[in-house]
Amino acid sequence: MTHSAPDPAALPDRAPGSNPNPGHGPAPRSAPGPAAAPEPGRTPLADTVLARVTEVFPTAADPERAAGAAAYMKDVAPFLGIPTPLRRRLAREVPAGLPAPAERDCAAVALGCWALPEREYHYFAADYLRRHVGRCGSGFLPVVLRLVTTVPWWDTVDTLAAHVVGPLVAADPALRADMDRWIDDERLWVARTALLHQLRHKERTDTDRLFGYCLRRADHPDFFIRKAIGWALREYARTDPDAVRHFLAGARGRLSPLSVREAAKHLGPLPPPA
């Protein structure tokens, strides 16, 4: 189906009739945080990008593949059914010949794509932001929060966490205070974003926050939080394995077995819990 360019202001808080925390019970109360994302309105550049992507993507749709993709993603959203390599190639062609976006364009493209039902448009937006996050400032974080909490699932949240939120925080350390709020948010996808935002920071990782966040959510019952704790630790272990090994030696009794198992995948045998 070909869509007309959507108005970003029409973006719902979540997909109609869906739970913003799909598969994890009723929508929880959210913790205090930054102001809601301002409505960016439309921009000529964003309108062009949206018109192109909604013209090109449907030409590659595959209904049979779409049904399988939706089932794999627990029906969080409908799919067009475009194979990933083809989708990425088409996505590279969409902005060909266009100028680099300003922050306002990035917001309009992202929210406009998120207002469309098919998941491939959300992927396009996440990749577009990943490519152009360097053109966005600290004030863009509320836009990302809106994306993280709208039709949320790991397939978009993880890209936004590591490749959009992470660079924003690295560019402006004042945003660490926002991460300190996000880690305590009762919406699991917001907390997961805080856990994963330093995945690509390597030597620049704020280890006090990394280890502190893991302990603050150590008793969280959800698979996606426990997995994120282990993933964040495992990734940092590539940079400083001794620091992660030392942390696990003291915290192993507090972390879930899943978190410990994921964190220690490349560390070799660990000593018994203290």
Image: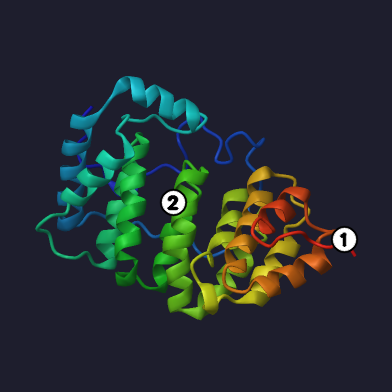
Q: Which residue is mark 2?
A: 147
Position of 4 with respect to 188 (left or right) is left
Q: Earlier in the sequence, mark 2 or mark 1?
A: 2
Q: Which residue is drawn at the image coordinates 37% and 44% (left, top)?
A: 11
Looking at the picture, which amino acid does disc 1 mark?
Answer: Pro
Give the residue at the far right of this rendering. 274
| Residue drawn at (79%, 61%) of the image | 270
Q: Nearer the viewer, mark 2 or mark 1?
A: 1
What residue did someone put label 1 on? 273
Task: Please name whichever residue, 163 or 105, is drawn nearer the observer in this view of the structure.
Answer: 163
- Answer above or below: position of 173 versus 62: below
Task: Determine which quarter of the picture holds residue 117.
Answer: top left
Residue 77 in the image: above or below residue 264:
above
Q: Is residue 134 left or right of residue 255?
A: left
Residue contact between numbered discs 2 and 1, judged by CB atoms under 8 Å? no
Position of residue 253 measured from the top left corner of the image (x, y, whole percent): 85, 58
**x%, y% of residue 261?**
72, 52
What residue sits 63% from the left and 46% below the top?
224
- Which residue occupies the foreground of this view, 157 or 34? 157
Tell me where residue 126 appears, x and y as whole percent.
Answer: 36, 52
Residue 100 in picture, x, y percent from top left:
19, 65
Assign a secondary structure to mark 1: loop
Residue name at image x 57 percent, y 50 percent:
189
